[in-house]
Image (cartoon, rainbow, N blue to C red):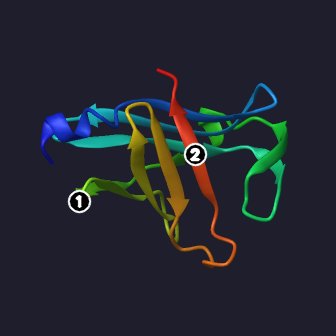
Amino acid sequence: MAENELSKFEGTWTLLCGGKTAVFATFKPDRHMLTGSIGIGNMRGDEPGNPIEVYDEPDEKHAWRITSARLESGVLRLEAGPNRKLEFKLTGKDTGRLTFLNADPAVRPVFLLTKTR
């Protein structure tokens, strides 16, 4: 992967709900690729999967480790263990969309994250 393309994704991205973190994604450079983790809090959501209330915030200890990351046509394709395929697409300079690809399309969670660090 080209380092300048990947640098757009580096950092910590979060989705806040009621002042609490509902979802986070961290992407760190490691040679010519990205590593990191994805954390999903214990929350209640509406039909499209948007958080309404966060009961427990996610933490690094229980986060999914990114095992594979590749950039395809501006979209970061991610794997975070068995049966955890996701994609992260930038929607602006400091905003992005995290999508769970192997969930049922009718209820597939899509989270809009903001770069916080």
Nearest the eye: 40 or 47: 47
Residue positioned 16% across, 41% down in the render: 32
Residue positioned 15% across, 37% down in the render: 3
Mark 1 or mark 2, earlier in chain: 1
| Quarter occupied by residue 28 | top left
Q: In this view, does 52 lie to the left or right of 38?
A: right
Q: How far apart are marks 1 and 2 (CA)?
A: 19 Å
Residue positioned 20% across, 40% down in the render: 5
Question: Under tag 2, what secondary structure?
Answer: strand
**Disc 2 marks which amino acid?**
Leu
Residue located beneath label 2 in the image:
112
Residue positioned 52% across, 23% down in the render: 116
Residue contact between numbered discs 1 and 2, judged by CB atoms under 8 Å: no
Image coordinates of residue 20 in percent, x first then y, are 76, 29
Question: Under tag 1, what secondary structure?
Answer: loop
| Quarter occupied by residue 18 | top right
Q: Which mark is residue 73?
A: 1
Question: What number of labels is visible?
Answer: 2
Image coordinates of residue 94 in percent, x first then y, are 43, 31
**Disc 1 marks which amino acid?**
Ser
- Near mark 1 (Cα within 10 A), the count class, few <14, some 14-19 or many ≥20, is few
Whether residue 101 is situated above or below residue 87 in the rendered picture: below
